[in-house]
Each structure stands twice: as C-alpha cells, then as structure tokens.
Image (tube, rainbow, N blue to C red):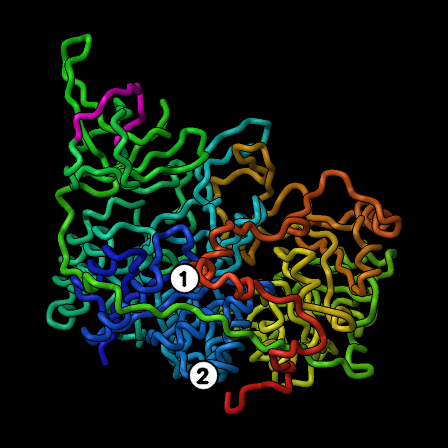
C-alpha cells in the first residue's frame, strides 16, 4: 500500500489547494478542542459538507481534537464527539487520555490517531496505545531515521511522521512556556510562540546581547522521503493549518511529485521537488534530527523568529484616501475591511519591492505581535531627492521600525476547483443536548494507598541534594533518574541517606528508542537493587512497568485535567497522581472529590521546566540567564540529558497549604529538581510551609486563574438553539457529585473498562 500524503486544511481555500494538488488525506479542526484555535477552522455545515465531498473523491479527512480537556468541558466534549460520530470523519487526532477513554466507552466506531502532542517516541509507547485501540501514532518530531525505523520494526501500528513545516524547540507536547506567561497553553491550542520571541541574554562579565535564541528553522525532509518510505512510514504529514492556501498547494504538490516519481528516478524526483519548494518563503530549512543533534544547525539567534523574505523596515508612514476599488479582489485586505482611509508605508533595507496582491507579515519592533496582510495598493511617488519611492498599503497597526517579510507573491496564487458544494443548506447536523453520564472514580479500598502516605514529599535531581534535604524529614523522596543518579545508583551503588522504601524514582517524560533500551536495563538493575516505586511520565513507562508488581504514580506529564483521563490511567494500574504544573485549584477540586483527594499530590513549590529540549544548547549560548521584553527572567540549563528553560522566580502556593488540608488534600510536593539544593534554601521553604506564609518573589502560574479561555470558545456550540429554545439547559458541565443525576447514569473507573480493549 502506498504511503499517504496528509496535508493541512486550516480553511476552505487550503482544503481546495490540498485536494487539488493530490493529497490523499487532509486534517482540519473545528471551532473547539484543537491545537490551532487561531486558524480559521470549519463551521458545522462546512465540515459536514467537507466529509461528504472528500469521501466522494475517495480521500480521507481527519479531525484534530488534540488538546487537553478540563473537567468543566467534558459534557461539551461528549456532545462534540457524538456529533463527529454521526458525521463520520475517517479518524480523530487526539492528545487527551480522557478523549480516548470517552471514545472507548461511547463511540467505539470512531478511529483514533495519537497526536504528536501525546509525546510518543518509542515502540513501547506505540504498542501500549495500540492495545488501547489507537490505530495510528503521529510520532514526536525529535527523531531520526534509524529511530523511526526501529519503532516501525517493533510495532504493527500505523506511523505518521511530520516532513515539512514549523518546528517547536521543546520536545513534543511538553512545552509549558506559553501557559506560564498567561495561561495560553500549547496543550490547549493557544500557544503564543514563546520560542519565536526576541530575548536579551546576560553574558559573563555583565555584557548583554539580544537574539532569537529558541526559534528553530523549519523542517524540510523532501530529500529523505524515499528513505522514510523504505522504513515503512504510513503517512507523511505537512504542518500548516495556520498557513495560506498558496503555501499548502505548493508544498503538497512538491511532496506529491516525489511520492509519485521517486522509484523511477530518485535523485531527479527529489531535485524537482526541491525546486518546487523554492517559493516557500518561510524560515531557513533543517532536517532537524536527521542531521544529528548539533543545535547550531537548526538554531540561529540572529534569524528573526518570523517567516518570509525580508523586505526591510518601515521607515515612514502616511495616511490618505485609498484609490482601491471595491472589486479589486486580488488586492483586498485579509480582514475584508473597506475603509476609505488607507495607511501607507515606505520600506528601507530590503531587496524586493512588493506588489498589490502580495502577502506580507509585519513584526512589531517590540516583539509584541505579528500581523499578516495582503497588500491592497502600491504607490510610486517622487521623493524630495527626485528618485521614485514605493509606498505600500499596510494595516493600521503597523508602526515605524517594524520589520516586514514577504510570505507569498500574487503570481504564486492559483485557483483550485472548489471541494465544498455551493449550497450548504442540506448540511444541518450540530451537537445536540445529550447528557454525559457521570463518571465516578474507583472507590478507595482500605490500605489501597499505603504506598502513598500523607505528608510532604521532596523531589531532587542528585543524591547530594537528598542529603541536603534530609534534615527536613520528608515522608518520601522523589529522585529523578538522570545521568548523574544513574551513575550513583547503578554504576557506583552509592548508599542512600534513607531507606529505599522511602524513595520514588521519577522517569523522564521523553522516551526515544535509545532511551527505552537504556531504561529497560536501568529498571532491571534498580529493581535488583531494591527499588520498586516509580513516577511515570510517558505511556512507554506504563508499558515497561505494567506487567511488574511495581508501584506507579502518574507524574505531571501524564496530563490529567479531567476524571476521564484519570479513569484511563486507572485502567493502566495507576492509582495515585501528581498534579500537572499547569493545573488550577478549581480543576483539581472538580476532578478529585471527597476521599478521592487522598490520591493526589499537589505541588507547592517548583521551578517548572518551560522548555524541555532533546539537545544541548550551542556552545555560542554563553549565558544562563535571559529576559523577555516584559522584563521577566528565565534560566537556561544545558545538561547531558538535554536542555531546559525554567523561570528565575519559582512557582509557589506554599501559603495555601492550610486551606488545601481543610479541603481534604494531604499529599504535597516540594520540587527542587534541577536547582542544586542549598540547606538554607530548603530550610526557608519548609519554614514558610509550616507557618503557611507566602514566599517572596514567586509566581502562581495558573493556580488561581486557570487556563485562558476566550468567551467565544465557551459559547460556540449550538448558537441557533440557544436563540430559539430558551428553556434548554445551559451548555456547560453540571456540577459533578458523588450521586448520579436523575437524568444520567453513573460509571465507575476500573469497573467501566471497555471490554476487548
């Protein structure tokens, strides 16, 4: 069977371009629950029509439902999934274990694909998901050819690989930076692209310099396509639901050509494909991990975080009445405005003069935002020096000093046959008012949490840090398994400052084929040494430990923002959990009620890893501290196990511990990992904890306000019904209780497992 070419369809025009250029399948989002909420996305009738039209052409359509879901959203999710079940797309691309659990229970005919946001990078993880009924896995981007090949050799699951488009500097699904800056979580489809920002670094000696330190090049694997086909990859994915139809069309055409012609003439097909991509005015290109782990090959701090050919900076601005006519469609603004007063800009520093109809992107000089715009009008006027000056129309937000980039030229535009029918009136399906049955988590049995005593836990990264914290008498230590502790525990067999029964070993959330092999060996050695309690952070860990009689606690990277996700993990023999760093108080209270709160460990203090990078930072990054334009400070740490970016000011809710205890929470975490513990610091933290005092210079992260959630996302479902049926129930999750609602049935966690999964 020929490998699938999968293209993005962020809007109707991109759908036309993808299908027109020969994509075998497209993926798209609707107005909620997808990781590109800033793209246009599809309305209900457009989506229903698209499914029918694409199927008529014998092609496939996948829906992105690849965000984490809060407990308050689960009823809306249930209605959304029921709607999708009726419309019948070919698969859902999902991240949240709660969606997997809900589909297993209610919609088993819906095919599931694991999103790259699920952070799957090993055969152990792929095979666990396969056993759970997930047909395809979109592998993490941070893998090379041999790693992908080894995974394919060890699984019967379908594998999908990104081959073109923007990269994230953080390991797939593990970025917390945008969420930390204002609740706009990458795991919620609201990433503000902190990696693309302009930062000021503090160099040794006090000097400072600025750069785009964490903005990676764009992925381009067109010349590796034949090798990936031979490796058995089932689907090749083009990134770009935020991109224009022109971009989608040109990139799809190039990869289509190589897929169709490589067997006849591999070298010639690849060269032709690369020429077809020459109009991709995006960032510099990289093969990423296919060319090794040297970060200097895909990070360039001198390259602006945006895309396109540099056109120069705005030197001057003026406003005047526009001569544009209403029917000049090729030059109409992207926002459809028809203002008679137009702003014009004079650019200096570039080598290309844009024309009406060209698409540009303006970057605010203070790095506060980016504006995409289609040039409406170009005016050539004489300057005071007698030479001609070219002024181009720009949006009102443009300012002096803003750099401008060319995204697409008007000549690159191409008309495609429309996929959707002109008349959408026959397509009327929408989510209904179905009620989600209440899910009760598994009732606790006597002594079922004997391994999980009440009290304060301390997490550290080295044995010496354990010694530094010993005087604070934590009920348990959590010790990271890393290069340092692996050497101490396995190679040197160093003595611990406490009993092994008092130690949980925390496993790294990113697990590749190489680390899977090493981890299997490490787990065997650690078990033989007497360790049997683990913090698991990746589905691979569950698969490696599930058959053993060991104890697993779900770590913060097994995202549990709803009880359906908790229930799925219960079915993997995980009965206790550590809150995610992104969690809010209200989310935890809504998931864990009454006695169930004894199953949760709440983090009170941490320096959370905002970026987790698989590589060491380049040698030229001679700094550890850097600041953003708002003056917020961060710390960069490069280790043999990868690189990390953490806030200079830690997260802390230590002063809330007495309130949490009254609410029934009784397990608390002081996370000192990756900090180098000093006795004075840990004493000050514990003293504040016992007194219930706030620590100065700390952040709340999302604890108080939760995730950013625009109003339109809460109210979008069934707007027509709200207008016509005033008596219908509000479209929000009813407050959960331990007793079933009269109109609902109650499911319990482990007792409600879907049979045959």
Q: Where's residue 402, x and y in %?
A: 36, 28
Q: Which residues are magenta?
A: 311-324
In this rendering, the answer to whether 201 lies above or below 732 is above
Query: Viewer-nearest of labels 2 and 1?
Result: 2
Mark 2, secondary structure of its residue: loop
Q: Nearer the viewer, residue 185 or 217?
A: 185
- Position above or below: 198 against 229: above
Please tell me which residue is depicted at 79% across the width and 45% down the height of the picture.
681
Q: Residues within 10 Å of mark 2 (few under 14, many from 20)?
A: some
Q: Which mark is residue 673?
A: none
Cα–Cα span, label 2 and label 1 = 29 Å
**Residue at 49% in and 58% down:** 171
Residue 243 as seen in the image, left or right of residue 113:
left
Tag 1 secondary structure: loop
Viewed as shown, does residue 739 lie left or right of 346?
A: right
Which residue corresponds to mark 2? 108
Q: Quadrant of residue 221?
A: bottom left
Q: Where residue 17 sits: x, y (%)? A: 20, 58
Residue at the spot 34% in from the left edge and 51% down from the top edge: 242
- Residue at the image position 43 percent from the left and 50 percent from the top: 295
Give the overall secondary structure of the magenta segment: strand
Residue 111 in the image: above or below residue 477: below
């Amino acid at each position: 069977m020929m490998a699938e070419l999968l293209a993005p369809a962020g809007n109707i025009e991109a759908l036309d371009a993808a299908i027109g250029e020969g994509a075998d399948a497209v993926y798209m989002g609707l107005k909620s629950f997808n990781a590109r909420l800033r793209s246009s996305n599809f309305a209900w009738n457009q989506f229903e029509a698209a499914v029918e039209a694409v199927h008529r052409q014998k092609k496939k359509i996948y829906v992105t439902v690849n965000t984490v879901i809060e407990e308050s959203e689960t009823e809306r999710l249930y209605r959304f999934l029921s709607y999708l079940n009726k419309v019948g797309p070919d698969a859902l691309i999902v991240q949240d274990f709660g969606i997997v659990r809900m589909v297993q229970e209610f919609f088993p005919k819906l095919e599931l694909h694991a999103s790259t946001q699920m952070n799957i990078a090993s055969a152990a993880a792929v095979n666990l998901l396969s056993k759970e009924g997930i047909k395809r896995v979109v592998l993490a981007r941070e893998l090379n050819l041999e790693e992908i090949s080894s995974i394919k050799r060890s699984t019967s699951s379908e594998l999908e690989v990104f081959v073109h488009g923007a990269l994230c500097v953080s390991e797939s699904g593990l970025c917390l930076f945008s969420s930390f800056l204002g609740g706009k979580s990458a795991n919620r489809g609201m990433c503000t692209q902190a990696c693309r920002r302009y930062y000021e670094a503090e160099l040794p000696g006090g000097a400072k310099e600025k750069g785009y330190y964490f903005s990676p090049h764009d992925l381009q694997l067109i010349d590796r396509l034949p090798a990936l086909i031979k490796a058995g990859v089932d689907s090749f994915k083009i990134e770009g639901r935020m991109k224009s139809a022109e971009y989608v069309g040109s990139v799809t055409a190039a990869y289509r050509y190589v897929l169709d012609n490589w067997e006849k003439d591999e070298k010639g097909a690849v060269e032709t494909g690369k020429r077809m991509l020459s109009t991709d005015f995006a960032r510099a290109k990289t093969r990423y991990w296919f060319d090794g782990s040297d970060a200097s090959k895909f990070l360039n701090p001198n390259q602006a975080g945006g895309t396109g050919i540099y056109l120069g900076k705005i030197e001057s601005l003026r406003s005047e009445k526009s001569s544009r006519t209403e029917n000049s469609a090729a030059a109409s603004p992207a926002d459809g405005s028809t203002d008679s007063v137009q702003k014009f800009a004079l650019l200096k520093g570039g080598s290309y003069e844009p024309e009406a109809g060209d698409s540009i992107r303006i970057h605010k000089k203070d790095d506060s935002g980016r504006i995409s715009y289609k040039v409406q009008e170009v005016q050539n006027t004489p300057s005071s020096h007698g030479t001609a000056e070219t002024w181009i129309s720009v949006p009102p937000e443009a300012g002096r000093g803003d750099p401008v980039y060319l995204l697409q030229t008007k000549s690159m535009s191409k008309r495609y046959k429309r996929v959707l029918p002109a008349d959408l009136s026959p397509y009327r399906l929408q989510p209904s008012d179905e009620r989600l049955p209440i899910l009760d988590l598994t009732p606790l049995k006597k002594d079922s949490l004997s391994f999980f005593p009440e009290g304060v836990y301390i997490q550290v990264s080295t044995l010496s840090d354990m010694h530094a914290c010993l005087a604070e008498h934590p009920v348990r230590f959590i010790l990271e398994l890393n290069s340092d502790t692996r050497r101490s525990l396995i190679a040197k067999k160093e003595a611990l400052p406490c009993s092994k029964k008092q130690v949980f070993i925390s496993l790294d959330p990113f697990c590749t084929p190489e680390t899977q092999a090493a981890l299997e060996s490490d787990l065997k050695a650690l078990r033989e040494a007497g360790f049997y309690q683990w913090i698991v952070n990746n589905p691979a860990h569950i698969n490696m430990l599930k058959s053993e009689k060991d104890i697993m606690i779900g770590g913060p990277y097994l995202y549990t923002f709803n009880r359906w996700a908790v229930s799925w993990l219960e079915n993997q023999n995980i009965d206790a959990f550590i809150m995610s760093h992104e969690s809010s108080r209200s989310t935890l209270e809504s998931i864990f009620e009454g006695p169930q709160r004894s199953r949760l460990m709440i983090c009170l203090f941490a320096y959370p890893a905002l970026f987790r990078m698989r590589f060491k930072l380049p040698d030229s990054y001679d700094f550890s501290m850097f600041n953003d334009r708002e003056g917020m400070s961060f710390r960069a740490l490069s280790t043999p196990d990868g690189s990390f970016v953490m806030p200079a000011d830690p997260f802390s809710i230590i002063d809330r511990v007495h309130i949490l205890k009254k609410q029934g929470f009784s397990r608390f975490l002081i996370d000192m990992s990756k900090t180098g513990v000093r006795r004075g610091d840990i004493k000050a933290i514990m003293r504040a904890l016992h007194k219930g005092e706030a620590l100065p210079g700390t952040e709340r992260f999302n604890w108080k306000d939760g995730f950013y959630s625009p109003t339109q996302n809460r109210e979008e479902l069934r707007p027509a019904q709200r207008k016509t049926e005033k008596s219908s129930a509000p479209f929000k999750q009813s407050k959960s209780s331990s007793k079933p609602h009269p109109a609902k049935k109650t499911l319990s966690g482990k007792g409600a497992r879907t049979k045959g999964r």
